[in-house]
Image (spheres, rainbow, N blue to C red):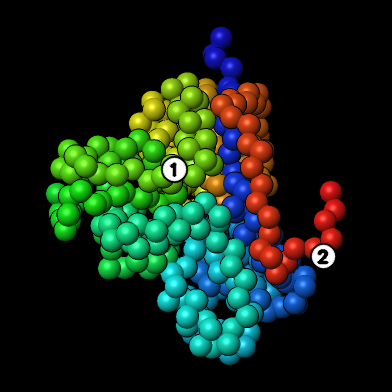
């Protein structure tokens, strides 16, 4: 008898506290101020979320100069540089900052080490909004290190005054590989005061590592521009999954992927609403994968307060 088809469902998966807060920020701003509410860049890197908020009246723009003078603009979860705050002020924009508090923490670290005249080696992906925001806090002190292979190009002024920081959504393993390379080159390299890769990124990677060795296929629900979702595909393959694919929606799944397969792992990136995962589970159930087993490696209880401008006047439980 053939092995029973089953789904392993990673826990934790999906929305992290920072994404939850950012999406709710736009929803509350629309409730309070009415449409349109302008949002600089995608509030979070997820196609479905952006399309859903657009339908409600959010207007996504590339830069603040596309926002009419005096209008309301929300800054995305990925954070912005001081320059963006300045240009918004010049246009008299009302701003609500939905930057994830864990990204804000990295901004504060960058400012602090720049004040102390350190060279800051920022590990991250070139062009990612979060990296641009963090680097913008101290552009004359920050050098981007995009993976282990770019370590050779790094030069510093004083080898005793360097520190590494990182984008919050990287692969933990690849980041440590980069740090180890940097430390070989610069033995006096300082670590950040606390871990920069966010708890949710780490937890989702740990869950996938636990699940992947038992999977013929791992499906990661998430968008291509979502750094943490793309990393989950890489982590799944490195941890032993025979195949792994990134999909935005159930309809993106090629049923040929399921040929001859008994165990499918499912997870989702930190900016992915659970409704999209349910769609994938439904599609798999229709194709005989109707047994679902959770693989739980952590229990997340982190929550972040909404930006001050949107908090209710009185606290209610």
Would you place residue 221 above or below residue 142 in this image? above
Q: Residues within 10 Å of mark 2 (few under 14, many from 20)?
A: few
Residue 250 visible in the snapshot: no
Question: Mark on residue 313?
Answer: 2
**Residue 311 placement, left or right of 18:** right
Q: Position of residue 42 (x, y in %)?
A: 53, 65
Q: Are marks 1 and 2 in contact (CB under 8 Å)?
A: no
Dot 1: element: loop
Image-quadrant location for residue 77 = bottom right
Image-quadrant location for residue 295 = top right
Q: Earlier in the sequence, mark 1 or mark 2?
A: 1
**Looking at this view, is 65 or 234 the one in front?**
65
**Residue 180 placement, left or right of 304:** left
Quadrant that contains the N terminus? top right
Would you place residue 122 above or below residue 280 in this image? below
Dot 2: element: loop
- The residue located at (28%, 53%) in the rendering is 121
Q: Which residue is mark 1?
A: 194
- The residue located at (59%, 63%) in the rendering is 98
Q: CA distance from mark 1 to mark 2?
A: 33 Å
Image-quadrant location for residue 267 = top right
Residue 241 visible in the snapshot: yes
Q: Residues within 10 Å of mark 1 (few under 14, many from 20)?
A: few
- The residue located at (73%, 66%) in the rendering is 310
Q: Which residue is farthest front? A: 116
Q: Position of residue 278 (x, y in %)?
A: 67, 41
């Amino acid at each position: 008898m053939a092995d029973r088809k089953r789904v392993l469902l990673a826990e934790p998966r999906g929305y992290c506290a920072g994404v939850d807060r950012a999406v709710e920020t736009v929803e509350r701003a629309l409730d309070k101020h009415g449409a349109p509410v302008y949002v600089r860049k995608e509030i979070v890197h997820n196609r479905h979320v952006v399309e859903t908020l657009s339908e409600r009246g959010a207007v996504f723009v590339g830069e603040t100069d596309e926002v009419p003078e005096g209008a309301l603009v929300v800054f995305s979860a990925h954070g912005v540089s001081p320059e963006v705050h300045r240009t918004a002020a010049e246009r008299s924009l009302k701003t609500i900052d939905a930057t994830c508090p864990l990204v804000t923490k990295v901004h504060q670290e960058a400012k602090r080490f720049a004040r102390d005249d350190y060279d800051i080696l920022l590990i991250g992906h070139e062009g990612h909004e979060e990296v641009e925001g963090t680097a913008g806090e101290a552009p004359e002190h920050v050098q981007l290190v995009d993976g282990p292979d770019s370590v050779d190009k790094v030069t510093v002024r004083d080898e005793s005054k360097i520190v590494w920081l990182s984008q919050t959504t990287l692969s933990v393993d690849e980041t440590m590989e980069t740090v180890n390379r940097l430390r070989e080159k610069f033995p006096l390299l300082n670590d950040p005061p606390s871990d920069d890769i966010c708890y949710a990124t780490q937890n989702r990677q740990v869950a996938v590592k636990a699940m992947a060795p038992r999977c013929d296929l791992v499906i990661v629900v998430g968008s291509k521009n979502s750094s943490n979702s793309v990393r989950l595909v890489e982590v799944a393959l490195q941890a032993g999954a025979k195949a792994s694919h990134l999909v935005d929606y159930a309809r993106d799944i090629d049923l040929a992927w399921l040929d001859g397969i008994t165990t499918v792992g499912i997870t989702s990136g930190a900016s992915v609403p659970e409704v999209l995962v349910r769609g994938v589970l439904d599609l798999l159930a229709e194709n005989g994968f109707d047994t679902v087993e959770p693989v739980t490696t952590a229990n997340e209880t982190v929550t972040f307060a909404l930006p001050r401008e949107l908090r209710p006047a009185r606290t209610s439980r």
